[in-house]
Image (tube, rainbow, N blue to C red):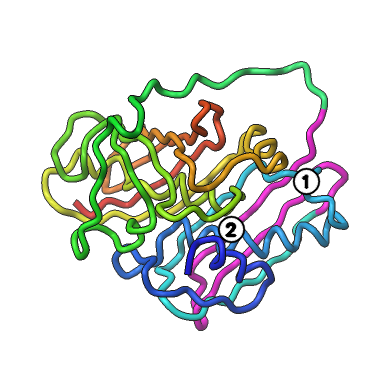
Amino acid sequence: MNFTTLVESARKPGAVTIPAGWTQGRATFGGLAAALLYQPVETTLESATQGAIADTPLRSLTISFVAPAEVGELQTRTRVLRAGRSAVQIEAHANQGEQVVTAALASFGKPRQSTIGISPDPAPQFSPPEQCEALPYIEGLVPEFTQHFDYRLAAGALPFTGSSEPRLGGWIRFRESAGPVTTAHLLALIDAWPPAVLSMLKDLAAASSLTWTVEMMPAAHRTKAAANADSGEWWQYLAEVEQAEDGYAAIRARLWDSDGQLMALSRQTVTVFG
């Protein structure tokens, strides 16, 4: 089942089935877990705004990975915390049995006039994808879900190579084009790379996200509205470890389209078992 078909099946609160092929260790790939929980949030937003969701785009999504989401049935539920004139806040939970596995808080907001306008830093000047090292999929050695993505390394080093450079990035795309890009696709693309801190380790070790906040940029809303971006296109990604201690790392990441427009900002707290 391709990514688009899978996340579309989760549009409404209730049950959705996580298929095999999307795991990282014993847990489901975090980008997919977030996308599956975000889908019914959008449906709830449609009801809260009488269908005018394009006028109230996603500004921020905070995810807590409470427990590993495993292959099998996932129950999702949502609740509108407040629907004001310009902003809507929605919380969501995903359960397997009695255990909450993923929790989310989504904040949506209408554009408003402002005298403040600060442009983001430009996209990195990566070499073209065809000139960058392709990351291979080696069954049993790399996370299972990575078979669905095409990676080209342009900054930093491979995991577990003892690099002194606290950053990792390059180009990424879905191996199989999954149609027009949506917020769910962007969530998967910005989370598909390994945590940048793993490149600094010399020995194999596990890592997992504890919390994750993604902020969507106006360019992402315009791109989706124009339906001019395909999820199978190349996207630029760069992550930087800002601080690491006590087995936790704070990592900042950014995602740009192939034209260098900033699509999303990401900040994660990652647990490192090594």
- Relative to 262, 274 lies left or right: left
Residue at disc 2, secondary structure: strand
Which of 110 and 176 lies nearest the eye of the viewer?
176
- Residue 272 in the image, given as x and y percentages of width and height: 27, 51
Assess whether residue 125 is covered by the magenta stretch.
no
Residue 109: name its quadrant: top right
- Residue 12 in the image, given as x and y percentages of width and height: 69, 70
Q: Amino acid at mark 1?
A: Ala
Main SS of the magenta part reads strand
Q: CA distance from mark 2 to mark 1?
A: 20 Å
- Residue 221 in the image, given as x and y percentages of width and height: 68, 39
- Relative to 40, 269 lies left or right: left
Please report whichever mark, 2 or 1, sits nearer to the chain's N-terminal start. Answer: 1
Name which residue lies at 45% across and 80% down: 72
Name which residue lies at 78% across and 34% down: 111
Is residue 231 shown above or below 223?
Answer: below
Q: Amino acid at mark 2?
A: Ala
- Residue 216 in the image, given as x and y percentages of width and height: 61, 39
Residue 240: name its quadrant: top left
Name the mark on residue 54.
1
Is residue 141 shown above or below 221?
Answer: below
Q: Nearer the viewer, mark 2 or mark 1?
A: 1
Name which residue lies at 59% across and 41% down: 229
Q: Which residues are magenta?
A: 83-112
Crowd class of label 2 (few under 14; some 14 to 19; many from 20; radius 10 Å) = many
Name the mark on residue 213.
none
Residue at disc 1, secondary structure: helix
Name the mark on residue 104.
2
